[in-house]
Image: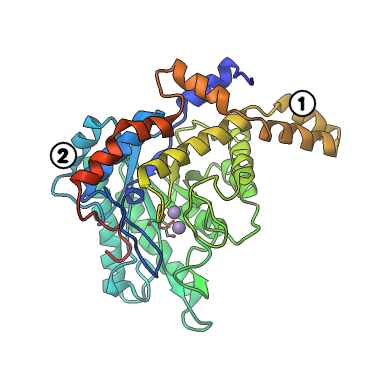
Amino acid sequence: MTTFTPDIEASLAQQSIELPSWAFGNSGTRFKVFATPGTPRDPYEKIADAGQVHKHTGLAPSVALHIPWDLVDSFADLRKHAEDHGVRLGTINSNTFQDDDYKFGALTHEDDRIRRKAVDHHLACIDVMDATGSRDLKIWLAEGSNYPGQNDLRARQDRLADSLRTIYDRLGDDQRLVLEYKFFEPAFYHTDVPDWGTSYVQVAALGDKAMVCLDTGHHAPGTNIEFIVMQLLRLGKLGSFDFNSRFYADDDLIVGAADPFQLFRILDQVIRGGGLNNPDVAFMLDQCHNLEAKIPGQIRSVLNVQEMTARALLVDRPALAAAQSANDVLGANAVLMDAFYTDVRPALAAWRESRGLPADPMAAYAASGYQQQIEADRVGGTQAGWGA
Ligand code: PSV
Ligand code: MN
Ligand code: MN
């Protein structure tokens, strides 16, 4: 059986992955949202469920919130509730995609009133961060156009820079802004922040507290995502990941389900670039569990990240560097593939047990009775937010 060196064990022990509150709510496609028994009815129950993921894996100590989906009367109280469930509140996600005013844009809108409203929403999100103790404000913008000529692309970029500046200036010393890019959807012709380059240009103009968020599902098929990871780490601008996997577009499926090798390659570059367990790089999930049960879906997800991290940590870096320097094409490739093909599951199970965690977190959750309990107790769970 593969065994881990103390260095690898230390890296695994430090790993933490943030869960999205919305993964615990019901979600679906534009065709249908299927209700799942036991779905949380409010943000408090979403956090309780996130606590279960952490309890069984030791991997997920924080939960990202989405405003206004997770609006509560008192964020100080929600913070206390999270702590009572063994987790803390993490990234605050803004939402400028469900209001009629934003049909033609929010932070890029031509109308000053609407643009100001969108900026004010972000300032209110920073107020929430002050109460929750969150560090990061994550901005994903559903802005763009559907037809060539519909909009002045350049003017929108200028207005975006202006809006982001006002938001950035409100950040506290220990707070950050992370700007997420996405190549299409909901707009189909142009998107105002379509790629890492645009996000980088915008955040670089703002300052050190602004970083890029890389969502693995937000690239054109075939994109070499690990190259982007390398470049952003090299530039010191990789602020966060939204992990998920996809077969076609922005599918938001369980990370590592569609393409474990891609996840391995990404984590290999994270390690190579000093991004693993680096406080400047937040590892988050951004997923929806439309068909499967949500808590086990999240447990499976963080385990997939852990598994590919362990494999990437097994890469023999001196041997790889030597093969690369010698232009030993197949030798270098073999070093990488040897690590990728290593089955680390038995070693991870043993390692978990040695730390007082269940060897098999999926089985432990299934045996815990929690799922049966919430299915009995909760009736009328909330939608994740889309359309809510
Ligand atoms: C929409 O594509 C999206 O999935 C973005 O990735 C955001 O991070 C998320 O929704 C929540 O706003
Ligand atoms: Mn995302
Ligand atoms: Mn997305």
Horizontal and vertical percent position of residue 36:
31, 53
Residue with the mark numbered 1: 319
> Residue 71 — which label?
none
For the residue carrying disc 2, how many other residues have a C-alpha within 10 Å: few (<14), some (14-19), or many (20+)? some
Tell me which label, 2 or 1, sits earlier in the chain. Answer: 2
> Residue 77 — which label?
2
Horizontal and vertical percent position of residue 132:
24, 40
On screen, residue 249 versus residue 383, left or right, reads right
Mark 2: amino acid: Asp
Task: Write down the quadrant of residue 84 in the picture.
Answer: top left
Task: Write down the quadrant of residue 112 in the picture.
Answer: bottom left
| Distance (Cα) linking label 2 and label 1 | 52 Å
Task: Identify the residue shown where x is 17% and y is 39%.
Answer: 76
Front-most of 296 and 175?
296
Mark 1: amino acid: Ala
On screen, residue 151 versus residue 76, left or right, reads right
**Mark 2: secondary structure:** helix
